[in-house]
Image (cartoon, helix red, strand yellow):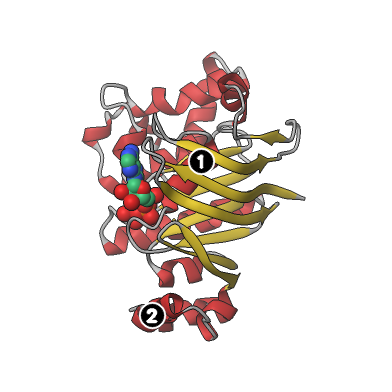
Amino acid sequence: MNVLDVNGLTVRAADGRALVSEVSFSVAAGGRLGLIGESGSGKSLTALAVMGLLPPGMTAAGSVVLEAPGLPRTEVIGAAERRLVELRGRAAAVIFQEPLTALDPLMRVGRQIAEPLRRRQGLRGAALRGAVGEALDQVRLPERAARAYPHEISGGQRQRVAVAMALACEPALLIADEPTTALDVTVQSEVLALLDTLVAERGMALLFVSHDLAVVAGTTDRIVVLKDGEAVESGSVEGIVNSPRHPYTRNLVTSARHLEDALERTIR
Ligand SMILES: Nc1ncnc2c1ncn2[C@@H]1O[C@H](COP(=O)(O)OP(=O)(O)OP(=O)(O)O)[C@@H](O)[C@H]1O
Ligand SMILES: [Mg+2]
């Protein structure tokens, strides 16, 4: 079963310009797909289109089908907002580059994590408090973090909170859009390792968006390469890294700084 099937996805700006053109890929249940490309290549718009969260004025054409256990198979493009609300968080959840975009600055961390649990799982009172504690524990944050406001914790901790919120409803597919780009290098690898473990433990599928081939190669099994809104190449991580066909991909491979590390992790 595929949790996500994207077929001929085209995203247009309000003026009709195609920002993403005829992109197709799928993610199998428990599979891990990397979406890679330079800045402006359409990675985030593709991720947003999957969630039905394109900015106002933009339109999507083609097909985006989400399917998750216990939920009806749904065509996202053209779906009513109330259907999408049901899917978000459960069929697919997203983690953004800048954790602050996902967090409410005026609300304590614990309440923010509690919100999806309350709404989607109907938890209340002690059960809800217990679930929040567990959610924090999963992302290796102490229980007292629940009482902090987002500005009182570090960037790495904020991203852990965003991960906890995304995982709260056990989505079949986790979409991570440059989840560690805003963090410094050591924190980056900690958050990546955490994501990797949590996704593996839950048998979740992962759509991982990054401009960094080394990071993608170490995190996913298959890669789609976007350039100017088009998928120019796709295949297994080994295939892409060892024998890239498109000149753009070849360029990416040669310039990937930490490629040696990534290859080691891939071959592991
Ligand atoms: N709200 C918007 N209105 C108009 N154009 C937009 C908007 N958001 C993105 N674009 C354009 O769409 C194209 C793709 O943007 P997108 O954000 O998907 O790129 P990206 O691959 O995620 O880049 P980055 O690596 O910088 O995050 C870019 O040319 C961008 O300028
Ligand atoms: Mg982006």
Quadrant of res 57: top left
Determine whether the residue tagged by mark 1 lies in a helix, strand or loop.
helix
Residue situated furthest top in the rendering: 125
Q: Residue at x 52, y 35 (%)?
A: 134
Residue situated furthest front in the rendering: 16
Q: What is the crowding at mark 1: few (fewer than 14 residues within 10 Å), some, or many (at least 20)?
A: many
Give percent across and percent down for residue 7.
Answer: 64, 50
Q: Residue at x 58, y 79 (%)?
A: 238
The reply to whether residue 179 is in sight is no
Q: Earlier in the sequence, mark 1 or mark 2?
A: 1
Q: Quadrant of the C terminus?
A: bottom right
Nearer to us in this view, 28 or 122: 28
The numbered mark at residue 255 is: none
Q: Is residue 262 above or below residue 13?
A: below
Q: Is residue 66 above or below residue 80?
A: below
The reply to whether residue 184 is in sight is yes
Quadrant of res 88: top right
- Horizontally, is 214 left or right of 24 in the view? left
Give percent across and percent down for residue 259.
Answer: 41, 80
- In the image, what residue type sits under mark 2? Asn
Q: Residue at x 42, y 71 (%)?
A: 213
Q: Residue at x 38, y 80 (%)?
A: 251
Q: Is residue 243 above or below residue 209?
A: below
Give percent across and percent down for residue 114.
Answer: 47, 24
Determine whether the residue tagged by mark 2 lies in a helix, strand or loop.
helix
Q: CA distance from mark 1 to mark 2?
A: 28 Å
- Horizontally, is 98 left or right of 220 in the view? left
Q: Which residue is mark 2?
A: 251
Give percent across and percent down for residue 171.
Answer: 61, 39
Q: Which residue is mark 1?
A: 49
